[in-house]
Image: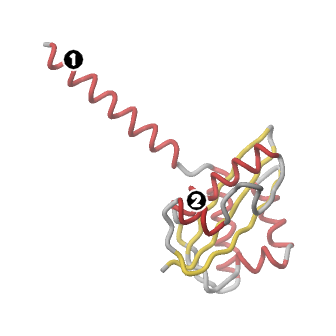
Amino acid sequence: MQFRTRLAAGAMAAMMLCWSAHSQTSVTRAERELFASVNQARRAQGLAPLRWDESLAAAARRHAAIMAERRTAQHGFENEPSLSARVKQAGAHFSWLSENVCEGPTPRFIHSQFMKSPAHRANVLDRNMDSIGIGVADHGGELFAVEDFSQAR
Protein backbone atom coordinates (compact mmCIF):
# COMPACT_ATOMS: atom_id res chain seq x y z
CA MET A 1 0.00 0.00 0.00
CA GLN A 2 2.80 2.43 0.88
CA PHE A 3 4.46 1.71 -2.50
CA ARG A 4 1.26 2.70 -4.36
CA THR A 5 1.00 5.92 -2.36
CA ARG A 6 4.58 6.82 -3.25
CA LEU A 7 4.00 5.87 -6.86
CA ALA A 8 0.86 8.02 -7.03
CA ALA A 9 2.63 10.93 -5.32
CA GLY A 10 5.56 10.59 -7.73
CA ALA A 11 3.23 10.51 -10.74
CA MET A 12 1.39 13.58 -9.46
CA ALA A 13 4.67 15.45 -8.95
CA ALA A 14 5.81 14.54 -12.47
CA MET A 15 2.50 15.74 -13.93
CA MET A 16 2.78 19.05 -12.04
CA LEU A 17 6.38 19.49 -13.23
CA CYS A 18 5.33 18.86 -16.85
CA TRP A 19 2.41 21.27 -16.52
CA SER A 20 4.68 23.92 -15.01
CA ALA A 21 7.26 23.51 -17.78
CA HIS A 22 4.51 23.62 -20.42
CA SER A 23 2.87 26.72 -18.97
CA GLN A 24 6.18 28.58 -18.96
CA THR A 25 6.68 28.02 -22.68
CA SER A 26 3.09 28.17 -23.91
CA VAL A 27 2.47 30.86 -26.50
CA THR A 28 0.17 33.63 -25.32
CA ARG A 29 -2.77 34.94 -27.32
CA ALA A 30 -0.90 38.21 -27.94
CA GLU A 31 2.18 36.33 -29.18
CA ARG A 32 0.02 34.19 -31.51
CA GLU A 33 -1.71 37.30 -32.85
CA LEU A 34 1.58 39.06 -33.59
CA PHE A 35 2.97 35.89 -35.20
CA ALA A 36 -0.10 35.64 -37.46
CA SER A 37 0.15 39.35 -38.34
CA VAL A 38 3.83 39.04 -39.30
CA ASN A 39 3.17 36.06 -41.56
CA GLN A 40 0.09 37.71 -43.08
CA ALA A 41 2.20 40.78 -43.95
CA ARG A 42 4.88 38.52 -45.47
CA ARG A 43 2.35 36.54 -47.53
CA ALA A 44 0.89 39.81 -48.84
CA GLN A 45 4.35 40.62 -50.22
CA GLY A 46 4.86 37.14 -51.71
CA LEU A 47 7.34 36.10 -49.00
CA ALA A 48 7.56 32.76 -47.24
CA PRO A 49 6.12 32.63 -43.74
CA LEU A 50 8.49 32.55 -40.78
CA ARG A 51 8.82 29.45 -38.59
CA TRP A 52 8.24 29.77 -34.85
CA ASP A 53 11.47 29.30 -32.88
CA GLU A 54 10.98 28.65 -29.18
CA SER A 55 14.58 29.63 -28.34
CA LEU A 56 14.06 33.03 -29.96
CA ALA A 57 10.73 33.31 -28.12
CA ALA A 58 12.41 32.56 -24.78
CA ALA A 59 14.92 35.36 -25.37
CA ALA A 60 12.13 37.70 -26.53
CA ARG A 61 10.00 36.91 -23.47
CA ARG A 62 12.88 37.65 -21.10
CA HIS A 63 13.56 40.98 -22.78
CA ALA A 64 9.82 41.85 -22.89
CA ALA A 65 9.61 41.20 -19.14
CA ILE A 66 12.51 43.58 -18.52
CA MET A 67 10.88 46.23 -20.71
CA ALA A 68 7.60 45.83 -18.80
CA GLU A 69 9.41 46.05 -15.47
CA ARG A 70 11.13 49.26 -16.59
CA ARG A 71 8.00 50.48 -18.42
CA THR A 72 9.84 51.38 -21.61
CA ALA A 73 10.51 49.70 -24.94
CA GLN A 74 14.21 49.59 -25.75
CA HIS A 75 16.50 47.17 -27.55
CA GLY A 76 18.78 46.89 -24.54
CA PHE A 77 19.33 48.09 -21.03
CA GLU A 78 22.40 48.71 -18.92
CA ASN A 79 23.86 45.42 -17.63
CA GLU A 80 21.66 43.38 -19.99
CA PRO A 81 23.41 41.14 -22.55
CA SER A 82 23.30 42.15 -26.22
CA LEU A 83 20.66 40.73 -28.55
CA SER A 84 23.02 38.08 -29.92
CA ALA A 85 24.14 37.08 -26.41
CA ARG A 86 20.51 36.88 -25.17
CA VAL A 87 19.52 34.68 -28.11
CA LYS A 88 22.59 32.43 -27.75
CA GLN A 89 21.90 32.05 -24.02
CA ALA A 90 18.38 30.88 -24.91
CA GLY A 91 19.84 28.22 -27.21
CA ALA A 92 19.15 29.67 -30.66
CA HIS A 93 21.50 29.06 -33.59
CA PHE A 94 21.61 31.75 -36.23
CA SER A 95 23.68 33.43 -38.89
CA TRP A 96 21.77 36.73 -38.79
CA LEU A 97 19.48 38.47 -36.26
CA SER A 98 17.20 41.47 -36.01
CA GLU A 99 14.73 42.69 -33.43
CA ASN A 100 11.57 44.76 -33.16
CA VAL A 101 10.43 46.24 -29.83
CA CYS A 102 7.31 48.26 -29.08
CA GLU A 103 4.75 48.96 -26.40
CA GLY A 104 1.05 49.50 -26.87
CA PRO A 105 -2.45 48.57 -25.77
CA THR A 106 -3.08 45.68 -28.19
CA PRO A 107 -1.20 43.33 -30.52
CA ARG A 108 -2.99 44.94 -33.48
CA PHE A 109 -1.75 48.39 -32.46
CA ILE A 110 1.80 47.10 -31.95
CA HIS A 111 1.86 45.41 -35.36
CA SER A 112 0.57 48.58 -37.03
CA GLN A 113 3.37 50.56 -35.36
CA PHE A 114 5.94 48.07 -36.65
CA MET A 115 4.57 48.34 -40.17
CA LYS A 116 4.59 52.18 -40.07
CA SER A 117 8.27 52.24 -39.11
CA PRO A 118 10.60 51.70 -42.11
CA ALA A 119 13.23 49.86 -40.02
CA HIS A 120 10.74 47.60 -38.22
CA ARG A 121 8.81 46.94 -41.44
CA ALA A 122 12.10 45.95 -43.12
CA ASN A 123 12.67 43.37 -40.35
CA VAL A 124 9.17 41.90 -40.81
CA LEU A 125 9.63 41.71 -44.59
CA ASP A 126 13.29 40.64 -44.70
CA ARG A 127 13.37 37.81 -47.24
CA ASN A 128 16.56 36.42 -45.67
CA MET A 129 14.91 35.70 -42.32
CA ASP A 130 13.27 32.32 -41.81
CA SER A 131 12.48 32.17 -38.07
CA ILE A 132 10.85 34.29 -35.40
CA GLY A 133 10.24 34.22 -31.68
CA ILE A 134 7.92 36.68 -30.00
CA GLY A 135 7.57 37.68 -26.37
CA VAL A 136 4.86 39.86 -24.88
CA ALA A 137 4.70 41.06 -21.27
CA ASP A 138 1.74 42.90 -19.78
CA HIS A 139 2.15 45.65 -17.22
CA GLY A 140 -1.12 47.17 -16.07
CA GLY A 141 -2.80 46.64 -19.45
CA GLU A 142 0.13 47.99 -21.47
CA LEU A 143 1.79 45.35 -23.63
CA PHE A 144 5.54 45.25 -24.18
CA ALA A 145 6.39 43.25 -27.29
CA VAL A 146 9.63 41.86 -28.69
CA GLU A 147 9.96 40.16 -32.07
CA ASP A 148 13.31 38.42 -32.58
CA PHE A 149 14.00 37.38 -36.19
CA SER A 150 16.75 35.08 -37.38
CA GLN A 151 18.21 33.35 -40.33
CA ALA A 152 18.86 29.93 -38.87
CA ARG A 153 22.12 28.09 -39.47
Q: Is residue 85 above or below residue 125?
A: above
Residue picked out by circle 1: 5
14 or 115: nearer the eye? 14
- x then y, percent, for residue 61: 63, 53
The answer to whether the residue labelled 1 contacts the one labelled 2, judged by CB atoms less than 8 Å apart, is no
Q: Quadrant of residue 99?
A: bottom right
- Picture residue at 58% right of the left edge, 82% below the top: 48
- x then y, percent, for residue 60: 64, 58
Q: Quadrant of residue 139?
A: top right
- x then y, percent, for residue 7: 20, 25
Label 1 crowd bin: few (<14), some (14–19), many (20+), radius 10 Å: few
118 or 56: nearer the eye? 56
Tell which residue pokes out farthest to the front in this image.
Answer: 79
Q: Is residue 5 left or right of residue 136?
A: left
- Picture residue at 79% right of the left edge, 52% below the top: 106
Residue flagged by tag 1: what amino acid is it? Thr
User: Residue 144: which disc?
Assistant: none
- Picture residue at 66% right of the left edge, 60% below the top: 81
- x then y, percent, for residue 83: 66, 66
Q: In which quadrant is the N terminus drawn? A: top left
Mark 1 element type: helix
Mark 2 element type: helix
Residue picked out by circle 2: 57
Q: Is residue 29 above or below residue 60?
A: above
Q: CA distance from mark 1 to mark 2?
A: 39 Å
Residue flagged by tag 2: what amino acid is it? Ala
Label 2 crowd bin: few (<14), some (14–19), many (20+), radius 10 Å: many
Earlier residue among tags 1 and 2: 1
